[in-house]
Amino acid sequence: MSQQQRGRFITVEGTEGVGKSTNIDFIRKLLDKANIPHIVTREPGGTPLAEEIRNLLVVPREESMTELAELLLVFAARAQHLKTLIEPALVKGVWVLCDRFTDATFAYQGGGRGLSADTIDQLQNLIQGDLRPDCTLLLDAPVDVGMARAGARGALDRFEQEKQVFFDKVRSAYLQRVEQEPERFSVVDASADLATVQANIELVLQSQISLYKGVNNG
């Protein structure tokens, strides 16, 4: 490239058991095939310090965590993740593929925990500035389907131990985010068979790749 093009920031969202890990690996392979430099990361986490904060959030413990403490820990991990990994990669022209980002905060801490969207938005602006994902894939499935899959994986973390009513609120909050920003989101029916899910994901990713390469070649 004659001038360094900023990398694209792709996030994958969804409730428990919708197949994020499997399909993120599929997206990674698509980017490899397209010869696009990329990194794969996750939230909360992504750096050694942010992963330590993740452990505080997901490991079950005797002392209950307040909703506000949970929210602030999520954004503390995000602040570290952004400054040390995500932003430097994007500036270098590297794509960032992230398992969850701030939409998950609006869904889990907003929808699930009932915290104010305005409070979350204030923290989003403080920590992220104007940085937002270029494209967000929401893997959507009925909560009972996802919970059955998650339960089959083994021991459940602190979030996975929540009741179905919690995840119903989380899913509703995700779908509300789609209504608010339809141009950024692509919703994929994660209850379909894997081949269908991945065919739909590939359509979205090919569109992103074509847009990127079109700018790059222009």
Image (spheres, helix red, strand yellow):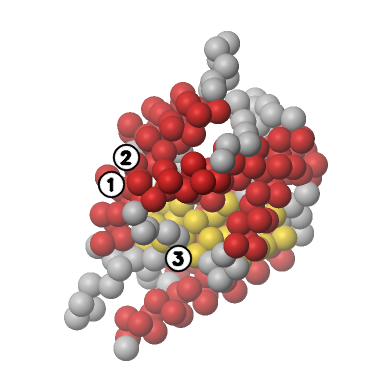
Q: Is residue 85 above or below residue 6?
A: above
**Relative depth, front residue between 131 and 68:** 68
Q: Residue at x 28, y 46 (%)?
A: 83
Residue 193 x, y percent position in the rendering: 75, 59
Q: Secondary structure at mark 1?
A: helix
Q: Is residue 36 above or below residue 193?
A: below
Crowd class of label 1 (few under 14; some 14 to 19; many from 20; radius 10 Å): few
**Relative depth, front residue between 184 and 146:** 184
The kind of residue tagged 1 is: Lys
Crowd class of label 2 (few under 14; some 14 to 19; many from 20; radius 10 Å): some
Mark positioned earlier in the residue sequence (3 or 2): 2
Residue with the mark numbered 1: 83
Mark positioned earlier in the residue sequence (1 or 3): 1
- Determine which quarter of the picture holds residue 150: top right
Query: Of the numbered discs in the image, which one, if any, rests on residue 80?
Result: 2
The kind of residue tagged 3 is: Asp
Q: Is residue 216 above or below residue 190?
A: below
